[in-house]
Image (cartoon, rainbow, N blue to C red):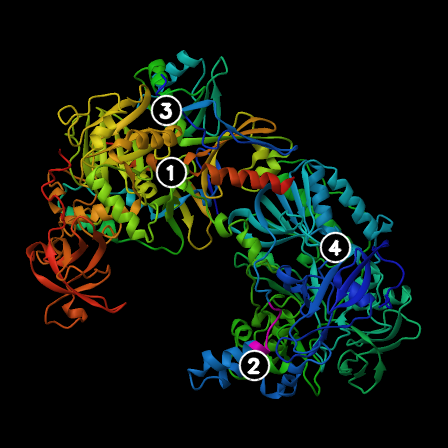
Amino acid sequence: MPDMLTAEPFLGGYTLDLGDVAVAEVTDISIVSIAMPLGGGDALANAVQAAWGCALPAPRGTSVSSDGSVTLIFSTPDQTLAILPGVDGLAVTDVAAKLGDVGYYTEQTDNWVGLRASGAKSISALERICPLDLASMSVGGAERTVMEHLGVFIMREDDERFLLLSGSSSAKSFLHAVELSMRNVT
Amino acid sequence: MIINHPLLGPRDAAEFYVMGDADLINRPDPDAEGAAEAFYEYAYLRDNPAGEHRELWYHEQGDRSWLVVTRSTLTHEIMNVEMARDVALAKGRGQ
Amino acid sequence: MTQSNRIAGGLVDRSKQLSFTFNNKSMTGYEGDTLASALLANGQRLVGRSFKYHRPRGIFSAGSEEPNAMVHLRRGAAQEPNTRATVAELFNGLEATSQNHRGSLEFDLMSVTDLASPFLSAGFYYKTFMWPKKFWEKLYEPAIRASAGLGRLSMQEDPDSYDKGFLHCDMLIIGAGPAGLMAALTAGRAGARVILADEDHLMGGRLNAETLSVDDQEGSAWAAAAAAELDAMPNVRLMTRTSVYGAYDHGVYGALERMTDHVPTSGGKPRQVLWRIYTKRAILTAGATERSIAFPMNDRPGVMLAGSVRTYVNRYGVAPGKKVAVFTNNDDGWRTATDLHAAGVSIAAVIDSREITPLAAIPGALILMGASVASTSGYLGLKSIATSSGVKIETDCLAVSGGWSPNVHLTCHQRGRPTWRDDIGAFVPGGDLPIGMHVAGAGNGSLALASSLKEGANVSASVASDLGFAATAAFPSAEDQSTDITPFWHVEGKGRAWIDLQNDVTVKDVKQSQAEGFRSVEHLKRYTTLGMATDQGKTSNVLGLAIMAEATGKSIPETGTTIFRPPYSPVPIGALAGRARGKDFRPFRLTPSHKWAETHGADFVEAGAWLRAQWFRKGSEKGWRDSVDREVEATRGSVGICDVTTLGKIDIQGRDAAAFLNKVYANGFAKLAVGKVRYGLMMREDGIVMDDGTTARLRENHFIMTTTTANAGPVFRHMEFARQCLWPGMDVHLISTTDGWAQFAVAGPNARNLLSKIVDMDISNEAFPFMACAETTVCGGTPARLFRISFSGELAFEIAVPARYGDAMMTKLMEAGEEFDATPYGTEALGVMRIEKGHAAGNELTGQTTANNLGLGKMVSKKKDSIGNKLSERPEMNREDDLRLVGFKPVDTSKPLAAGAHFVDNGKEAVTKNDLGWMTSVAYSPELGHSIGLGFLKKGDQRKGDKLRAVDLLRGGEVKVEVVSPHMIDPEGERLRA
């Protein structure tokens, strides 16, 4: 509809390539939190298996749907963050419809700004702000921690590629922290 | 300080918020006899031992679990870390 | 100046000559020099003035233990004081100047203090500058500070940047001398993840300073080969120029890596990086530091540590003197004489305090056994010495060895206590090491080379095996040089005998403090300042307490030792601050309409981490009040728009969500209808109000809670505690959605007219009454949430859209509101309107106020259990005559009110016993046309209409006020229900 509001990425779709290391805002994902009802773990796990063909993620890990489009991140002992492709309206509606009445669903897409850090020096850059042992993190591993006072989900997508999610209101400060780390090691 | 989170492994204390004595889990029964006195003690009276101490730590920049950390206040050695929810359930707070 | 003292040999690169200046004098050195070695090469013995007496001082050591040779390095804003010349690597264009003197270094005007030295003994300041008391701050302290001291700050902002970082390893090896290299090789070959850190730019430690061989190679060559092997291992991280300065809890270590201090400019990159290193185990292979012997006038330039003298010769190819004498109490001191002789430096004498057979015959040198040095001469540099038996020896450099003290510092950082070993005359690490720390090599008292190499390998193999690596210890061939010692601490005689050169502490000071009753070593340290300041007494502590022991007639173990805290060596404040400077001090949170606000005249205010618009300057408005008054009038007159995204939003879901809200809120929530919002009052368990806000019930099991901006985090934490620890049997789940939704208050009589143009639903009063809520869409499809709540007291809504639409939403609201003169308003106008309505905010919710104080006592439900309910029933919190929140207006309405003023009855003196409460918030109300206030007043609810004094004793001033209802505008709430 012509009158509908236009969405603006929190960092305007920022990208920076410094050769050995690069950062880019991730603007094409939706995020939904799925909470597991007390005593309802099996029902939720079954629904996730049926819908996406994968299990719920274990602590410090992720689980990827059989078609590779959806990634589930362990967030708390009874919550999972689902990362879905594309962004349009509220993803929570689709997830709730897909999984049914076996979980509690909360839209999280706009709570987070996504940054993808990549390159041979991505660990050298991130170790300036991330207290976790990234070299020991396996591909598909995910953790939540604090970088420069900001809460961050960090997920290792590949040997030299990390997805970072941090609060969208502090997106600029977070980008500054990541970018400065990269500039400091290149 | 490093806290060995039962689910997530060793984590820097910088990720946590500390609230002190784990006795705060034992909120009194408001309907029991002497509840006013029990709540007064619960809210205000804490032991401050030199040595082993059970404390509540919240993994605020992590998985948001409250933990019960058994720690020596003299050496900072951490003897045990439990999920506070499990501790509370074991005390019958799930009823 | 030519390099008059440069001799052959050493590890410097003579093909790379470097120019530098010292006190504006041009000099040259080579790559691989330190500033100290280059100064000595140029014959510059005098490099500074002492702390207290302004005595001429020279280079004393060749490492980070240096007490004397501190200089200003670089110029202008980049000038760094107290840089130890012994660790400053030479680079082309380096500029150094000496410090702590007035006039030139050679003719320091302050050296007159040296003449007064008989009076300036330990405790002088404490005893002398006591009276009159007020003179201390104005006269004594500035005068003392001007005369005593170290270097000066540039007083300009540090132009360099700093960074921090985090590293992880199985084994951290601290110090890359023989033991450290062996430990790293052993663990590295076994596959362990190793970090090997050394403060030097060259791995090898003493191997680079000695003429000892390992595996039939020169020690330095073996060290270079070992470092190369380690460098090729992917599991090993070599960190040169890195000082591990602290051992913290649970295997965490602090380290400072100097990235660009050895080059002219940092090139925009961080000058230093402060690392936090997480280790499974650590092996401290920190080596040992030589100490001096106290003898009369032992502080002259040219009196140096013996091991350092041969470091300059062997490593740097620099002879610290033309005719060198050695004074020792141990075998190691003789190595200086033999090494120097082999390098062609003339040895004047070897003076050994022990009555033993001389260890070597050195041609041309006087060998004196059972002798000691009793005096020296040469004001700006050593000229001669005389022994106790009166033998005078011409010499320009006296190499002194009082034995070697293991560097136990890091073993003490968790209160470990070193133990004394008589056989080596030194303290070694005690058994109570920090968890996960092991010690090897000279730092563990294994002073000789072969033992050190072997211990490094053995300890490392054992630690690596513990960690599950198949490690074997293999040893290179080497010999144990002789290190026999007979402790000998000081020489009696005329004249001052220095123990601590940096703080000008002498034998006399230690004896005096002992005589005055300072018997504990800790008291000795504080009274005399022994072992303080930048070197932390690395060369003087043991000497000082040995002399203390002698004075008390006790043994050294009985006397004990002071222990050490981090940092091992100085860490610049800039490095500790890291990036946290200026606007990067902490992160900022921006509201979704931030960009819009920036382009529309907003002034921003920090609200916690948030930057919020506090008002929007328009046209010719001069002061903030003009803008705020206009915003309030426009809102109350037509419609205003305010970004309220910063309020905490917590999504609460679960079968027991309503029951849970009943626990955390003092008032009832179980019966809140779906599609409705309710104001909630949250208490702490002690019955004090913690926070307030509105909570909307979107569905049976789905609520959205709002918190105050400041308490979003604490309330979430509190509710997680309640959920996990108090009621773990409830099915309830929490997640923050604060950042996810851009939320705008649209307030004023035209609010509905404006929003009807945007919201895709019927929002008439009938369809969407006061305190209604709904999930809806705006602009024909953008998802939204609508709440009919009002903080301003006007007809008002809060509309929320996903944050990525926030900027567009703000623009859209302003467009749609154009016909109503819609006005953006900031936090100040928000504050004015909430004061007019008597809503409590941060100034009232102080963490000390009860529901009764706020006039909300009736909200606390007696029918259910909730957090704080029980303790809020205590009699003291329910007194009739307690404070109540009420409104105030000035009797003379032209007068402004002041927050913080205290209320006193008319005719009563403004003293504590007559205090009736205080003003919490004030504002100018454009609608009422005068200043208004909220405040806590004793029995305030019963005093409407009374007139009181509002006395501001802090800033002066007093206003007569009348007590009014806190609901100063539209008390019946007709507007917000319209």
Front one among C740 and C381: C740
Q: Going from the N terminus, do you reach mark 4 or mark 2 first?
A: 2
Type of residue at label 1? Thr
Q: Specify whether residue C741 is in view.
A: no
Magenta region: C146-152
> Mark 4 or mark 1, which is nearer the start of the sequence?
4
* Same subunit: marks 1 and 4: yes
**Crowd rating for badge 4 (residues with CA inside 10 Å; few <14, some 14–19, many 20+):** many
**C428 horizontally vs C210: left or right:** left
Three-letter code for the amino acid on which mark 2 is drawn: Ala
The Cα atoms of the two marked residues, 1 and 4, are separated by: 55 Å
Task: Please state which amino acid type lies under the numbered disc 3.
Answer: Leu
Subunit bearing disc 2 = C
Residue A53 rendering spot, x and y as whole percentages? 45, 13
Identify the secondary structure beneath mark 3: loop
Mark 3 surroundings within 10 Å by alpha-carbon count, few (fewer than 14), some (14 through 19), many (20 or more):
many
Residue C205: numbered disc? 4
For label 2, the residue is C122
Give the residue pinned by disc 3.
A5
Say if the magenta span includes residue C276: no
Q: Which is the main secondary structure of the residues drawn in magenta?
A: loop
Indicate which disc residue C591 carries.
1
Magenta includes C150? Answer: yes
Q: Horizontal placement of C453 versus C891: left or right?
A: right
Question: Residue drawn at (60%, 63%), measured in percent from left and top?
Answer: C419
For the residues marked 1 and 2, what is the alpha-carbon distance in whole angstroms?
Answer: 60 Å
Quadrant position of residue C431: bottom right
Farthest front residue in view: C620
The residue lying toward the viewer, choosing from C116 and C286, is C116
Query: Is residue C533 found left or right of C385 in the rendered image?
Result: left
